[in-house]
Image: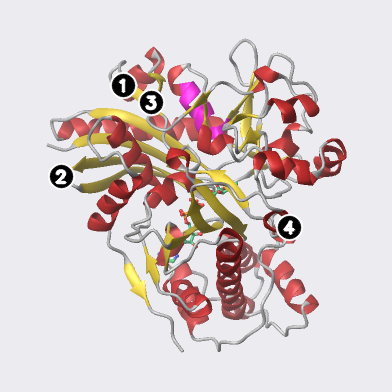
Amino acid sequence: MSSLFAAVDIGASSGRVIVGAVGAGAADLQVVHRFPNGVVERAGSLFWDIEGLFEQVLVGLTAAAEHAAARGSSIASIGIDTWAVDYGLVAADGTLAGPVFSYRDGRGATAVADVHGIVAPEKLYEVSGLQHLPFNTIFQLATERDLTDKQALLIPDLLAYFLTGERRSESTNASTTGLYDAVAESWSSELLGALDLPRYLFPALVEQGEVIGTLRAESAERTGLPLVTRVVAVGSHDTASAVAAVPATTPNFAYISSGTWSLVGVELDQPVLSEASRLANFTNERGVDGTIRYLRNVGGLWLLSESIRTWEQEAHDAGSPALRQSLLPLSLPELLAAAAAEPSGGPLIDVDSEDFIAPGQMPERILAAARAGGGALESRPAAVVRCILDSLAASYARTLAQAQELSGKPVEVIHIVGGGSQNTLLCQLTADAAGLPVVAGPVEATALGNVLIQARAAGAAPEALEGLRAIVAASHPGIRYVPRG
Ligand code: ADP
Ligand code: LRH
């Protein structure tokens, strides 16, 4: 009989609680609860609804307990992963000290110059190996007025704290703060000290497979799970869990974790901290089992989802049926089909530009970027969508060529995982632009990676990462795209 594990996986656009059954070299996932996620605007700032998300986690875990009971089984453990970088501050009395800001709020960017004035970008990279993003935790923390007696918990650590009462910092996500030493594999007392951040700011580090704690009485009562149910550390950075579940059958693979962001890179044993790597803005984020996720954040499907949000609003507000008609079609499948029928070789934009981080009026910003680049882009949704996808594919190809050059790692195949792996046009354009085969899927790689690390901790899956990936490859072989031309 398979063991059952509950994976809580929350991305910037949606969350799910999944029950994973692992046994006999196979992994099977059952989504028991899905819920939307997105930034919430209040008084000009952007936040996450952390209380609402925790409520959804409880609803999902209740469904997981019921799912297991209906099969005469039980949930062996719970693992949590979410997007990186953001945190909640916990006060001395254990309560949240304030709202949880979203990385799409501009506050981090306001502190970049101050932080760089204290620690030079070269030094930051030498220690943390982290790509420069204006919303990295280090910059957000620099905007906090009072950190006295407070601890910063990244989102999965915060949700685990709500569930168990235990505070830990899981290492893959810690590596996205800018305050984690990529070589020493610990919090950087040098950077914390230089920036006058208290040493107690972050809880003790925990590695994947270690137990964070068992459920608090309230969590057990609410979900129907036994008090002894463990919350186990997984690759709590969603991208780390996704990369762990890439169905690679060769070591020479690249990955694109495709969702709100596209995380594009290779897996390494050692960080690359060269000046060339810093200037190319590659990150050395920590992967599962101490691997290095050598990658860059490419703008991602955020450009598409945010454009659709604007068009939907415009269609909703449209005064005349003719205007409304001109904004159609609006459903994702229809838009993608229309974009596929657009001619190739259209204008390209720099999807990695910081100009696209904030929400609002995305089509306008895309048209302006195309114009600034000398391209003539029509404002029709199909043309804009085609421009986004062509530009993403071009950025993927460029990023992968750079990753190989800077790391020396050869790439024979590109694995695209996550929600964006269902975008057949983007998968084909990526294969074409990179001149390499693409294998698309699984859609739920992140949850699979989460489940497999729990299964391994319970002795129900192989020790080596290759063994875990072999399970994914056997259960979710993926769709192959061959480069054209
Ligand atoms: P995140 O974890 O960042 O919230 P996901 O991995 O859930 O993101 O991916 C969400 C993205 O997947 C959406 O923005 C959308 O572009 C894409 N997507 C979802 N379903 C489909 C589909 N049926 N066809 C093509 N693309 C899809
Ligand atoms: C993807 C992701 C990415 C981070 C960003 C904040 O969900 O975790 O790896 O850079 O969100």
Q: Residue at x 73, y 69 (%)?
A: 364
Instruction: Indicate yes or no: mark 2 CB to ligand 1 under 8 Å.
Output: no
Estimate how packed mark 4 is, as few (under 14), some (14 to 19) or many (20 or more) residues with alpha carbons within 10 Å: few
Q: Residue furthest top?
A: 93
Name the one closer to the observer, 185 or 416: 185
Sequence-wise first label, 4 or 3: 3
Q: Are marks 3 and 1 in contact (CB under 8 Å)?
A: yes
The quarter of the displayed image where residue 45 is located: top right
Let me know if residue 156 is in the magenta part.
yes
Q: Residue at x 30, y 46 (%)?
A: 468
Dot 3 or dot 2: first in sequence order is: 2
Identify the residue position indicated by label 1 in the image. Answer: 229
Q: Is mark 1 within 8 Å of ligand 1?
A: no
What residue type is disc 2 on?
Answer: Ala
* Residue that badge 4 annotates: 279
Q: What type is the residue that disc 3 sits on?
A: Val
The CA distance from mark 2 to mark 1 is 24 Å
Marks 3 and 1 sit apart, C-alpha to C-alpha, by 7 Å
Q: Are marks 4 and 2 in contact (CB under 8 Å)?
A: no
Q: Earlier in the sequence, mark 1 or mark 4?
A: 1
| Residue 231: numbered disc | 3
Picture disc at residue 24: 2
State how far apart marks 1 and 4 are (Cα). Answer: 46 Å
**Across the whole image, how many numbered discs are drawn on residues?**
4
